[in-house]
Image (cartoon, rainbow, N blue to C red):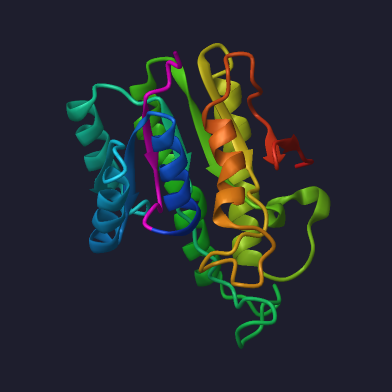
Amino acid sequence: MSKLKIAVVSGANRGLGLETCRQLAARGMTVFLTSRDREQGEAEAAKIRKSGHDVRYHPLDVTSPESIGELAEHIRSQTGRLDVLVNNAGIFPDPFPGRTGGSNSVFDTDTDLIRKAMETNTYGPLMMCQRLIPLMGGYGRVVNVSSGMGQLSEMNGCCPGYRLSKTSLNALTRIFSEELADTGIKVNSVCPGWVRTDMGGREADISPEEGADGIVWLATLPDDGPTGGFFRYREPIPW
């Protein structure tokens, strides 16, 4: 029987995060579905519970140290430990290429936009790891939901806020995985692909179910699985 029992998923009231909750719960885990939108989050958690799964809602703003601290203390009091952390909450603050007005060139990007992206996409996962990994007691799985747009090996122009924040998130994956190398905690980044969500748009290539597969795979790795890697469709990709 798997030792992985308790999971937290951020940004989980819709899209990839919600589908990740469904799939982890279907594997028998107790899942804390977290989001800023309490009404939608509670409603979605209730829907999954109707299928007989243990999914619990808790409010979370990953840009708030206080909110993250409250979540950590809630998990400690409710379950005493955590096994899986999926840092899924993210924003795309840049003008979307071909979809919205405004320039997405680095020459025109205001530093406030980059700062906003970093607060949610990088500093949020950093604080989540700092507060929640200690609850794992030396054994667990951390999945940072990144993007191919954060790959230095294939870095292109446009969308500097999103690109810089996801590249930095990948750096966090490497740093945490190295500092946890002597433990049973595995930390990996994943590019779920171009997924049909509110962020990805209806023209995207794959469904949320397909996109969540790689996340759940990394969240349930066996003891001999990889750590400190970057993956898409269960295959390693360059940083």
Residue 60 in view in this figure: no
Residue at the extreme front = 51
Magenta residues, start to end? 1-13
Which of these two is toward me, 18 or 58? 18
Residue 172, by quadrant, is top right
The furthest residue to the left: 77
Q: Is residue 116 above or below residue 82?
A: below
Mostly what secondary structure, the magenta segment? loop
Q: Is residue 126 above or below residue 160?
A: above
Q: Is residue 36 visible?
A: yes
Residue 181 position within the rendered picture, expressed as x and y whole percent measured from the top left: 59, 17
How many numbered circles are shown? 0
Which residue occupies the foreground of this view, 114 or 193? 193
Q: On the picture, is 154 further left or further right than 118?
A: right
> Residue at the location (54% across, 37% down)?
216
Q: Is residue 60 left or right of residue 112?
A: left
Quadrant where the image shows the C terminus: top right
Residue 27 rendering spot, x and y as whole percentages: 44, 30
